[in-house]
Amino acid sequence: RKRVVRVSTGSKQWDAILNGGFQSMSISEVYGEFRCGKTQLCHTMSVIAQLPKDMGGAEGKVAYIDTEGTFRPERIVQIAERFGVDPEQAQENISYARALNSEHQWELLNTLSMSFATNEYRLLIIDSIMACFRVDYCGRGELSERQQKLNQFLSKLNQMAEEFNICVLMTNQVQSDPGASALFAGADGRKPVGGHVLAHASATRILLRKGRGEERVAKIQDSPDCPEREATYIITNGGIND
Ligand code: GTP
Ligand code: MG
């Protein structure tokens, strides 16, 4: 029988508010303004997921769908060095693909559902979930079609998370229109894009923001089993840390 596994963030404080890390068998979403560390979290967890369980890992391979072109292999090398693992091996265990548009993103997901059948994978990263959809369906009259396609993608994602015991971590952008966020805002005046379709699909939602100095703050907005708490973290050469 499948058991939920947890993947550490790299920060003890952040792990603590998540009861040990992001969990498998459901979708987790981190969202927030630029430079909060969403992409750095993706890099960090891509290495940690491979580690033994007593180091916060899930002893699994990683699939990485990059929609913004911000994946950097040299960051994987640095993070691997922090955890004392072979950088070459760490890179080999990450199946990387750049999604060129939303149709391609869908095709990549379907290809991965075949790879996942080997039961070696434990983490799937999508950085970011909405970038391609927002470009491909930018017209006013295209919103309902976008949401329909998005729903199809997220349903498949949820099904794969459960069937193959995968931790799905996706990043998301925030509404940039200040008027809209003032009117409809969640906490701190920041609202994730993707509407109800995305809100419904993500079991765990975390808002990231800048804190004092180099500090960043992660706040749980939605979780099946954790209260709404905050944690601070920093971004280092070795990835997300306390
Ligand atoms: P967007 O994708 O633009 O919305 O931002 P993001 O939330 O993905 O931010 P990202 O994860 O790219 O974080 C950028 C921050 O990470 C910047 O403040 C960088 O200074 C920091 N950063 C990136 N690489 C390194 C590194 O190698 N060492 C350290 N110490 N910090 C880094
Ligand atoms: Mg990013």
Image: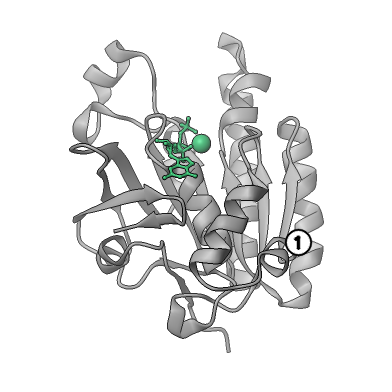
Indicate the amino acid at tag 1: Ser
> Height in image: 34 above or below 53?
above
**Residue 56 x/y as whole percent:** 44, 75
What residue sits right under mark 1 in the picture?
A: 113
Task: Return the residue nearer the eye: 130 or 91.
Answer: 91
Task: Return the residue nearer the eye: 22 or 46.
Answer: 46
Task: Return the residue nearer the eye: 86 or 234.
Answer: 86
> Left or right of 187: which side holds 197?
right
Task: Return the residue nearer the eye: 141 or 17.
Answer: 17
> Which residue is depicted at the point 77% across and 47% down?
108
Colouring scheme applied when the structure was drawn: one colour
**Residue 152 x/y as whole percent:** 65, 44
Quadrant for residue 50, please give it: bottom right
Q: Quadrant of the N terminus?
A: bottom right
> Height in image: 103 above or below 95?
above
> Which residue is depicted at the point 57% across and 39% down?
129
Q: Is residue 35 visible?
A: yes
